[in-house]
Every structure is written in structure tokens, then in C-alpha cells.
Image: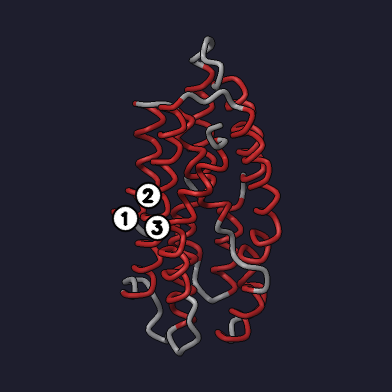
Amino acid sequence: MSPSAVTSLRLELSLVRPVLWAATARTWRADSGLPGRYRRYLCAMHQVIRASVPLMERAATRCEALPRDPVARPLARYLRAHAEEERGHDDWLLTDAAATGTPPEKLTGTVPPAHVAALVGAQYYWIEHSHPVALLGYIAVLEGNAPAPGLAGLLARETGLPPAAFETVRLHADLDDGHSADLDRLIERLPLDAAQRSLVAVSALHTVASLAELFDRITAVPTEWESTDD
């Protein structure tokens, strides 16, 4: 018997996830640069997360244009519901940034760099030119690598920034385990063919690689808007 779609996906991700873990560990190391890296993290995550709801809505619309596709209808229902669950999370990041002393307009007014566009933009390509089920690979990685429990408190202690600056980290640590379980159940229910399973896996692996690059860039190079006080 061949492994289930979820088992196969989790196995493939287990082989590459250490790359992402290593990148995040470098970002969160305790040193004098951590407050600045955390501010850069908030900017990068805002650029990513503000695309989440539009991505899901576009994928759901594409599904609804495929009435004979057995995957499309349940996938559209999931995406519409999940978009509502995620709505407004980008505003959480603006609130956190304000608590660090960073004006929200410095996040909203910054041009997203190419590596952020590559992370998110690949999903638009697959949604439009392959199948919207690709988005499940992206969601699986983002929600399967939620902040660790306790990270918000650790960062508050190590940075000296106020606890209010870490609400998004804390909330996603609490919420995303349940979301991952919901996603696993959906993938198990969907009648995915071999090409669709492969597409979900390719999307997930791309997301891991792109997220690792995003964290490495947060760690390596201060952005032009970062305060010189850091």
C-alpha cells in the first residue's frame, strides 16, 4: 500500500526542515543584534502575511471555476473558511511593530524585496497555471513551522522590548497547531491524483527553501529603514 498524501508530504518535509530550523536559530540567537533582527522579522512577516488572504481568495475563486473537478469544491470551502480565520493577522504585526517603536508606515511603505515576491509569487503562478491545490503546500509549511511555545517570552527577555511587541509570535504559537491538524485532515480527504500530490510537494519544498532564505536575509543584512539605535 502506498503512503497517504499527508504521510508522503510530512516525510518529504522532514528531510528539508532542518535547513529552515537552522536559519531561524541564527535569527533568534541571543546577542546585541537581536532587537534589530526582530524588527526586520516583523517587516518581512508583514510582507508575507498580508498576501495570505488574497492568495487564498484567489485560489478559491479558481476552484469555483472548476465545477467538474472533484478536488476543487472541498478545497474552495476550506480556503474561504481559512481566509476568514487569517484575516487581520497582518494588522497584528503592525501593532507589534509599533510596540517596538517602529512606525507602521515603515512596514506598509517598504517595497517588498525580490525574495519575498519569489516566496509568495510562486503560489500565484501555480494557482493560475497549474492547480490551486498547490497552495496547500505553502500553508502546510507556514503553519507547520509556527513559532515554538515560549519563544515570545524568550525574545522579550533577550531583546528588552516590551511583551506587547510579541503578540503575533505568541498567538501563532497557540493557533497554528490546530490549523495544521485541520489541513492534514483536508489533504487526507481530497481525491488527489499523482500530479496534484506532486504539485503540493513541490510547492511545500519551494516554501521551505524560500523561508530559509528569508530568515538568512533577516539575519545577514540590516534593511535601510532600520533604526540606527540598534
Which quadrant of the view contains residue 153? bottom right
CA distance for labels 2 and 3 = 19 Å
Q: Is residue 1 above or below residue 105?
A: above
**Circle 1 — which element?**
helix
Residue drawn 44% across the image and 27% down it: 194
| Crowdedness near tag 3: few (<14), some (14–19) or many (≥20) residues, C-alpha within 10 Å | few
Report x, y in % for residue 59: 49, 30
Mark carried by residue 119? 2
Residue drawn 63% across the image and 73% down it: 152
Label 1 belongs to which residue?
A: 115
> Is tag 3's residue or tag 1's residue first in the polypeptide sequence?
3
Residue drawn 49% across the image and 14% down it: 66
Which quadrant of the view contains residue 76? top right
- The reply to whether dot 2 and dot 1 touch (C-beta < 8 Å) is yes
Residue furthest bottom in the image: 32
**Circle 3 — which element?**
loop
Comparing 180 with 110, the one in front is: 180
Label 3 belongs to which residue?
A: 109
